[in-house]
Image (tube, rainbow, N blue to C red):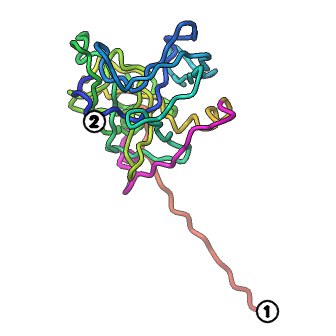
């Protein structure tokens, strides 16, 4: 995580990537701030089931999401809270302010130093059209993905952050827009990080979670989407056409 220490325990839902496929001996820790020492506000739960998305494609990281079924309910506190999930009608325009948290590397190949305190980084959303143009020689960006990062680099999620949340604030609510998926090294210029787009999975999540379903919220971006003006050799420009209508009056 090319960022800075987290100043609070963020309210987020932890997901995992397809690097883990068995729930055997898997434990989830909630309310954790550091990976070393005592975390007095921490709770832990074993995982009874991992539900991976059936459309996951390892070669492209498309549909890179999974759900964890915990063995027992979690008690919410001032340090452990749920996050709202972005609903299918959400809009995250370019430059939407977003936050990513994790314990991953602080630079490419550089682990988070002791005591491994939870890190946070603020990154803007990069529209999918622009992200496709930037990543055309690296990866295939699909509509199931959302990108975020500074075009000049310097700030990004990194190796070890996979499965963590990307969130944005709407009023008093934190809304999860993405799940850390992949990138090219970390914090390189013109290579924003790529995340699974949470809003694309509302139907699938509701299908798999039949009781106590999570709360989905429509995140709405203000203004216009500058990404619509982006084009390159693999992303054609958006053209508009003017339609003309003729009306006739008939006099008897």
Residue 219 on the magenta segment: yes
The residue to which callout 1 is attached is: 252
Answer with left or right where residue 2 lies relative to residue 87: left
- Image disc number at residue 112: none
Give the residue drawn at x 49%, y 30%.
142
Q: CA distance from mark 1 to mark 2?
A: 69 Å
Q: How many marks?
A: 2
Could you say which is closer to the camera, residue 228 or residue 209? 209
Q: Secondary structure at mark 2?
A: strand
Instruction: Examine the residues drawn in magenta and state their main secondary structure.
Output: loop
Who's the residue at 36% across and 34% down the image?
Answer: 10
Q: Say if the magenta span includes residue 64.
A: no
Point out the image quarter for the C terminus. Answer: bottom right
In this picture, is 37 found above or below 211?
above
Which quadrant is the N terminus positioned in? top left
Residue at position x 51%, y 47% in the image = 217
Magenta part of the protein: which range? 209-232
Residue 186 place in picture, x, y as percent = 28, 20
Q: Quadrant of residue 88?
A: top right
Where is residue 219 drawn, in percent x and y? 46, 48
Q: Position of residue 24 (x, y in %)?
A: 57, 7
């Amino acid at each position: 995580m090319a960022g800075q220490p987290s100043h609070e325990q963020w309210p987020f839902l932890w997901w995992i990537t397809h690097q883990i496929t068995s729930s055997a001996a898997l434990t989830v820790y909630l309310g954790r701030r550091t990976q070393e020492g005592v975390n007095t506000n921490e709770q832990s739960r074993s995982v009874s089931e991992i539900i991976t998305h059936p459309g996951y494609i390892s070669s492209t990281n498309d549909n890179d999401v999974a759900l964890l079924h915990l063995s027992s309910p979690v008690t919410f506190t001032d340090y452990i809270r749920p996050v709202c999930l972005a609903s299918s009608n959400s809009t995250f325009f370019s430059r939407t302010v977003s936050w990513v948290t994790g314990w991953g590397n602080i630079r490419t190949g550089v682990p988070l130093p002791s005591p491994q305190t939870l890190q946070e980084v603020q990154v803007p959303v990069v529209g999918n059209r622009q992200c496709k143009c930037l990543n055309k020689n690296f990866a295939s960006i699909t509509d199931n993905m959302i990108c975020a990062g500074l075009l000049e680099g310097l700030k990004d999620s990194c190796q070890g952050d996979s499965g963590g949340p990307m969130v944005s604030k709407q009023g008093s609510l934190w809304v999860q827009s993405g799940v850390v998926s992949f990138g090219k090294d970390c914090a390189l210029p013109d290579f924003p990080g790529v995340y699974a787009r949470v809003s694309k999975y509302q139907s699938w999540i509701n299908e798999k979670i039949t009781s106590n379903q999570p709360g989905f919220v429509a995140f709405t971006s203000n203004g216009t989407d500058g990404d619509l003006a982006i084009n390159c050799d693999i992303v054609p420009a958006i053209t508009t056409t003017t339609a003309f209508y003729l009306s006739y009056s008939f006099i008897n």
